[in-house]
Amino acid sequence: MSRIDTVFEQLRSEGRKALMPFVTAGDPDLDFTGDAISTLASHGASLLEIGFPYSDPIADGPVIQASYTRALGGGLQLPQIFAAARHWSEQVTTPMAAMVSYSIVYRQGLEQFVSLAREAGFSGMIVPDLLVEEATPLREICQREEMSLIQLVTPTTSRDRALRIAESSSGFLYYVSVTGITGERDQLPVDLTDQVGWLREQTELPICIGFGISKPEHVEHLAPVADGVIVGSAIVRKIATVGEMPREQVLSEIGEFADQLGSAL
């Protein structure tokens, strides 16, 4: 079991749902990322998703893409993220999951990347561009290292394929709420709860919903069918104002926003 499994067991025993905020490592710098992680952890985050900046993101919308560009523009490199994460994991007890392209993992070497991530304090990996047909080597390494390998199911995923993805995943299933890229939406698809309801009947894994969730009303709508919600662009957009506003003010706004989302779960 990974620490992510333990969190969901505890949440289920208490009848609660997970709030998983997303932040980009190194946007605008690693010190601020650490401050944002501490703020979110102290304002009710059950899990923390840390984006590893990548020059050619697969599913990220303009807000998160811009955050990756800012981080990479500052010269951010993979060893710096792992070094900073070791410090973050000493400051907070909230488990961290890496949102990372398979290209980064593959280039580093599967064994090496998982080992470095675990040593840095990560409890899981979300690999959005990893095909289920190619997931076995990484899944086996993650199992040995007690690292959750979280994979994505989308609205266009066939039911047979969704079952294969569920069998190949651990920690939780990441259900993509909309067809398309990440980003804030005014409304979520009307059939979203039905789709998630079917998937819930097929697997014992917790199901967390992400993409497009940007306000408490979304969270309140999804809470009855989801085990957790993932909120990224709405938080990253606030972080983008660092420089226009004092850092402490941005951190305060992030904390208040997390409180609002948590109160809707």
Image (cartoon, rainbow, N blue to C red):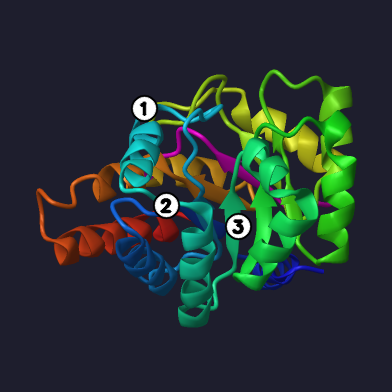
Amino acid found under the numbered disc labelled 3? Ala
Residue 96, percent from left and from top: 57, 63
Contact (CB < 8 A) between labels 2 and 3? no
Instruction: Specify the label residue 203 is tagged with.
Output: none
Q: In which quadrant is the N terminus drawn?
A: bottom right
Secondary structure beneath disc 1?
helix
The answer to whether one can see residue 31 in this image is yes
Residue occupied by mark 3: 97
Residue occupied by mark 1: 62
Instruction: Specify the label residue 23 is tagged with.
Output: 2
| Residue stretch rendered in magenta on the structure | 204-215
Q: Is residue 128 left or right of residue 134?
A: left
Task: Give how far apart the Cα atoms at labels 1 and 3 are.
Answer: 22 Å
- Circle nearer the N terminus (2, 3): 2
Q: Residue at x 29, y 58 (%)?
A: 254
Q: Check disc 2: other Cα within 10 Å, few if <14, some if 14-19, many if 20+.
A: many
Residue 21, percent from left and from top: 46, 54
Q: Residue at x 35, y 46 (%)?
A: 71
The question of residue 77 being in magenta is answered with: no
Task: Give how far apart the Cα atoms at labels 2 and 3 are.
Answer: 11 Å
Task: Give how far apart the Cα atoms at labels 2 and 1 are.
Answer: 14 Å
Contact (CB < 8 A) between labels 2 and 1? no
The question of residue 206 being in magenta is answered with: yes
Q: Residue at x 39, y 74 (%)?
A: 42
Q: Is residue 130 left or right of residue 237?
A: right
Q: Quadrant of residue 112?
A: bottom right
Q: Is residue 170 left or right of residue 182?
A: right
Amino acid found under the numbered disc labelled 1? Pro
Secondary structure beneath disc 3?
strand
Q: Residue at x 47, y 32 (%)?
A: 55
